[in-house]
Image (spheres, grey):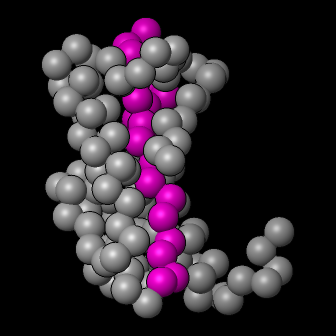
Amino acid sequence: MYAAAHPGDLLCAATSDHAYRIPALRGAEARGTYGADTYLISVNLASTSSHTLLPLSTCLGSCHTAETGFVLGNLSGPDAPQHLPDRNCEVRASFACTGHLAGPGHPNGALPHRPTHAGR
């Protein structure tokens, strides 16, 4: 599956999963086991453009805190997709006010189903 990947990239992915992704999933699963509405937000962005939407994203790929530019609406570059931070703000504001993600038909994170919000 990862035959074309550089060994350093594989180590980085495994370390990131171990330190961030898996603990977040386990915490969400634990909350969900007790019936609590639980949501996870995953940002999978690896910019390879020369003007980069996020600082250092060309060398770090999609790393922990890479979503900060979207959360704060602080993207740069001539092709910066402003609709993504706008939607991100809408989703987070709705969640803060209502406890639910914005948008019709957005299910809660009840197990075993794990819906994913894909901002486009």
Instruction: Pick whichever, 6 or 107, lies toward us.
Output: 107
Q: Quadrant of residue 28?
A: top left
Q: Quadrant of residue 98?
A: top left
Magenta-tinted stretch? 25-49
Instruction: Pick whichever, 19 or 93, lies toward us.
Output: 93
Residue 23 appears in view: no
Q: Identify the residue shown where x is 21% and y is 56%.
A: 73
117 lies above or below 62: above
Residue 83, given in percent of the width and then of the height, sits at 35, 49
Quick check: is 28 in the magenta stretch? yes
Instruction: Pick whichever, 24 or 77, lies toward us.
Output: 77
Does the magenta stretch mainly form a helix, a strand or a loop?
loop
Quick check: is 116 in the magenta stretch? no
Q: Identify the residue shown where x is 83% and y is 69%.
A: 1
Residue 5, given in percent of the width and then of the height, sits at 72, 83
In the current view of this chain or complex, which residue is farthest to the front? 78
Q: Quadrant of residue 59?
A: bottom left
37 lies above or below 54: above
9 lies above or below 93: below
Q: Describe residue 31's horizontal placement relative to residue 47 as left or right.
A: left
Residue 19, given in percent of the width and then of the height, sits at 42, 61
Instruction: Pick whichever, 45 or 33, lies toward us.
Output: 45
Residue 84 appears in view: yes
Q: Describe residue 11's horizontal placement relative to residue 19 as left or right.
A: right
Q: Identify the residue shown where x is 20% and y is 30%.
A: 93
Residue 87, given in percent of the width and then of the height, sits at 33, 40
Q: Describe residue 99's horizontal placement relative to residue 5 as left or right.
A: left
